[in-house]
Amino acid sequence: MMKAPINRIIPFSNVDGPGNRMAIFFQRCPFKCLYCHNPETINDCINCGICVDSCPAKALMIENGKVIWNKEKCVGCDQCINVCPNLASPKITYYSVEQLVEKIKYVKDFISGITVSGGECMEHADFLCELFKEVKKMGITCFIDSNGFYEFKDYPELCKFMDMVMLDVKAYDLNDHLSLCAQSNEHVLNNLKYLQDIGKLYEVRTVMLPNNPELNEKTLRGVIDNLDPNIRYKLIKYRPFGVRKEGLTKLGDNITADEEIERLVSIAKKLGHKNIVII
Amino acid sequence: MKEVLDIIQNETLTYSQQLLALARLAENMDHTIELSDELIKAKEEGIICDLGEGNAPYRPRYICPSYKLLLEKGSKFLDLQPAKDLYEALNNLLIMYRHVPSITSYPVFLGTLDDLLETYVQKVDYDSAYKALKLFLLNIDRTLCDSFVHANLSGRDTLTARIILKLTMEMQLAIPNLTVKYDPDKMDKDFMNLCIECMMKTAKPSFANDAMFRKEWGNNYVIASCYNGLKEKGGGFTLPRLRMYECSLKAKDADDFINNILPYYANLMLKMMDDRIEFIVEKSNFFKANFLVKEGFVDLDNFTGMFGMVGLAECCNNLLHIKDNTKGYGNNSEADELGVRIMEKLHAIVAAHKSKYCASFNHEYRLHAQVGIDSDGRENSPGARIPVGAEPIMPQQIMHSCKFHKYFETGIGDIFKFEETWKDTPEALANIIEGAMKNGMRYFSGYLENNDVVRVTGYLVKKSELAKLDAKQQSLNNVSVFGQGARDCGNALDRRIVKNDEGTY
């Protein structure tokens, strides 16, 4: 039976797409963004065991060479995540589609739909496809929150079942993207076009940096050049909370100034974009 | 009498608060209603509580007159003609409100305002309607100084309702309490979002499950006081309550409680209700001489007795020897199942008891989940609610409520406190409220954690008014003092906040 590693499920979320949604965070991400707020979702656990001794609640142990997490004992202090040298987490649960569907059924009357996120949930595209088939039967929507690393055109069946995608465009310029995320943005930009072509792009998001107005502006202009002016473009202020040391060193430890955001909004308006949201 | 002088000298009481307190003292000097030794003992032990209703009730506790009749026919006693325009309608209502008695001496029901006023509002321009309704609401807040004063909205998208919601957001007043009758299959989405926006700004309106109430009550139900379902042109005679935790202390075990203890005390309370209702109907002058009765604004048959209870959570936890609330009722299927067994039994006991009165209710009383009073402390949570501080994640809390709301036809409700981001996403909240109603929740209230107007246990207070009392100053609202007590003794404002990062589940 197919199972996927899940880092966290938020039963009621009002910030992951339209209406109230169950947000499901899958483990693993091919990007390594400097400003990632939850870097513990990037890699799978390699069972090095370093976290086990750090746990004050004794909720972690090694069994047959694997780190086992005891959910009941866990006090949620995140000490294990803080000491992990591998950008991973021992607090992962593997779910089958059926198990996840049970969880969704419990709250389906209270939500507009589910949003799958991560990590990068498209790491588990086949799983998502099977999950969406079941969720659509409940009459609720399936949204994908994606960094665009995997090309949606390569997953025609998933594209059929998903309702909409919320796409990150972290940087428009290739070198900027490489330095921020340690990966090319070629597929991201292809997705930006493709998802509009099939009418399934819900919104685009960019984190605007505190100390790099040039990069911000370049990305803003690049995205708007390639985006239907009515599709929402969310400008997210960089916030240092949860960012790992490497990111803080390179990007700074202050929140992006309101003035910088206002400057970018006025450029966006001049370029004729009609749907800008600031977070 | 020392009590008299205490009231006269108390600097935190307004004049009208003194007057009411002195009247209560006088009423309690009468002992016409005989109390059995068993009842006296049960009251002394804190098992049965009369909610300070007084020894000699001289009016029904809650009265919900037909204001439609007033606007259409006028009133002979009040010497008022039928209202021809918005100004006459509002003025007639304000006059009538001063003459509708209740346990608080203020009217606990002000009418379904948009139903009453829409035809009048439609005949004037927007600015005039806005100004007139603003003065109307201001008058209510400053003269009917009690948060149990309660207005309804029909749930239809009317201009009157929109103006009232707009004014409610602008004026930030604790009075009146406000309920919108909500049927997800009928209510316009845009209007629903406006109601939610208003609730997030000023803790009202609350949402009453229209389909559920209609099914049980017919079309002429209203919501009065905290969240009390009652019949229009009628009301509630009396509301004593069983304090379930104290009651459970008498039981050897859960079976003993259900088979012996609960029936004993429930029947004791039913007898007490019979006696009090007989006194109200047959001894006091209300049903003989009051103009509300004589002119047909209310009808004796439409009143019922409200059988109140508090502390189901603590009762179940005690019977199962659960010391930690976070592992008990609301978080523990064994405790929840016991709760259901107890409610099934209590519902059956109350339904089996026949009253001389209550003709529109098949001569039966109806259960009510009372919201608690400050002296309850932490030992009896309101009605069937999960104790503050032990609330599980929101979906679980809602599903839990849905199991119990069906038993309480004269009212039960849950309150949810939200963090800031929810004020910007009314669609998300609409999803939750719709789901709750469809799963059997009777009544839903919400508020934002940082607002001034907040919901305590069923009623609204302004935190700024509690601060006045804290500083030994007077508060115009009679209910601020209850809010202060509930905050200090019951931690009523510390309920769990609904956030996005709700942890894993």
Image (cartoon, rainbow, N blue to C red):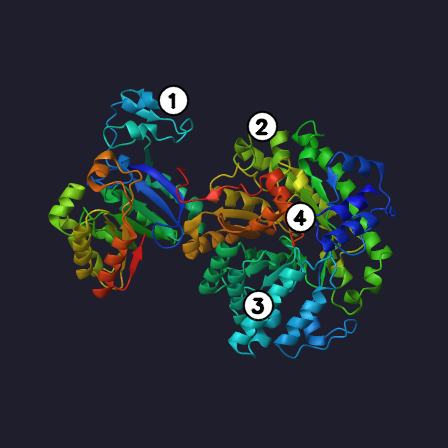
Type of the residue with mark 1: Lys
B401 vs B187: above or below: above
Q: Viewer-nearest of labels 3 and 2?
A: 3
For the residues carrying marks 1 and 3, which lies nearer the camera in this image? Answer: 3
Q: Spot the residue most to the right.
A: B32
Which labelled disc corresponds to residue A118? none
Q: Are marks 1 and 4 in contact (CB under 8 Å)?
A: no
Q: In the shown orientation, is residue B216 left or right of residue B290?
A: left
Is any atom of residue A41 visible in this view? yes
- At a point 52% along the width and 68% down the height, the residue shown is B163
Q: Which residue is mark 4?
A: B368
Residue A200 visible from this viewpoint:
no
The part of the image, by quadrant, that contains residue B141 is bottom right
- At a point 66% along the width and 52% down the height, the residue shown is B410
Give the spatial CA distance, label 1 vs label 4: 46 Å
Q: Nearer the viewer, residue A95 or B10?
A: B10
Task: Identify the mark nearer the N-term, 3 or 2.
Answer: 3
The numbered mark at residue B323 is 2
The residue where tag 3 is placed is B134
From the viewer's side, name the closer residue of B285 and B36.
B285
Left-right relation of B42 to A132: right
Say if labels 4 and 2 share a chain. yes
Q: Read off the chain for label 4.
A: B
Considering every residue shown, the one lying at the far left of the view is A175
Q: Quadrant of residue A130?
A: top left
Query: Label 1: which residue?
Result: A58
